[in-house]
Image: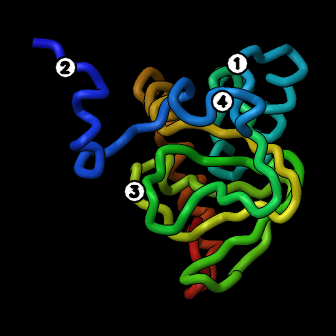
């Protein structure tokens, strides 16, 4: 017997929802992703990913592969990008605009172009450790966990580069500073 998704809706609070490119923010008008990635858009994404220390061990070929599967999302000022305690299945790189990082309702950091967040959730799928709220119109590169996982599963040598990048990131974090 096949059940339709609508038949399962009553159980949604108990089920973990895994966002995918097609199920989260599906249209540009809704602050979502554009499905068609042009050459310049992929190049811009490669440049953004290359600046993320987590990907230091990745070749240009691997960065192009991630960039081709990543999408660009937009957020208006005041809109929450991620919420503390919420499910985490993606990481983000700030392409333009600015945001505040809050933990327990208190602002603990600001994000500007070139910054990134959500790498822990992209690696382990765990809950968000802080909220990120757009202060200005923002454009973000979003990379889902399943994409990163697929690339690493297909090329296990990349796992060491990810671990080294994560270790560097954790060493930079001062005690008491949230890792978002």
Work out whether 82 lies above or below 96: below
Task: Using the rendered view, name the quadrant where residue 5 is placed.
Answer: top left
CA separation in Å, label 2 and label 4:
31 Å
User: Where is residue 15 shown, x and y percent of the image?
Assistant: 26, 45
Inspect this view and state whether residue 59 appears. no
- Tell me the element at label 1: loop
CA separation in Å, label 1 and label 2:
29 Å
CA separation in Å, label 2 and label 3:
28 Å
Q: Disc number at residue 35?
A: 1
Of label 1 and label 2, which has the lower sequence position? 2
Of circles 1 and 4, which is in front? 1
Say whether residue 66 is left or right of residue 50.
left
Location of mark 3 (residue): 126
User: Where is residue 40 shown, x and y percent of the image?
Assistant: 90, 20
Residue at x-position 50% and y-position 47% = 122
Of label 1 and label 3, which has the lower sequence position? 1
Work out whether 103 lies above or below 100: below
Of label 2 and label 4, which has the lower sequence position? 2
Q: Disc number at residue 7?
A: none
Of label 1 and label 4, which has the lower sequence position? 1
Answer few, some or many: residues within 10 Å of disc 4's Cα (few below 14, many 20 plus, some between 14 and 19). Answer: many
User: Where is residue 11 shown, x and y percent of the image?
Assistant: 22, 43
Are the residues flagged by discs 4 and 3 in contact, CB closer than 8 Å? Answer: no
Location of mark 4 (residue): 70
Location of mark 2 (residue): 3
- Tell me the element at label 4: loop
Q: Front-most of 147 and 55?
A: 147
């Amino acid at each position: 017997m096949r059940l339709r998704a609508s038949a399962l809706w009553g159980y949604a609070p108990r089920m973990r929802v895994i966002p995918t490119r097609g199920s989260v923010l599906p249209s540009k008008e809704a602050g979502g992703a554009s499905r068609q990635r042009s050459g310049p858009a992929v190049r811009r994404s490669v440049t953004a990913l290359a600046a993320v220390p987590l990907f230091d061990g990745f070749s240009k070929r691997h960065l192009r592969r991630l960039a081709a599967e990543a999408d660009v999302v937009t957020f208006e000022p005041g809109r929450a990008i991620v919420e503390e305690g919420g499910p985490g299945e993606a990481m983000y790189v700030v392409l333009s605009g600015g945001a505040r990082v809050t933990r327990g309702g208190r602002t603990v950091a600001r994000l500007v172009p070139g910054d990134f967040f959500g790498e822990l959730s992209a690696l382990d799928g765990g809950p968000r450790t802080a909220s990120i709220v757009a202060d200005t119109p923002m454009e973000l590169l979003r990379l889902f966990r399943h994409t990163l996982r697929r690339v690493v599963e297909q090329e296990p040598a990349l796992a060491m580069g990810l671990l080294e990048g994560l270790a560097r990131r954790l060493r930079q974090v001062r005690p008491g500073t949230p890792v978002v």
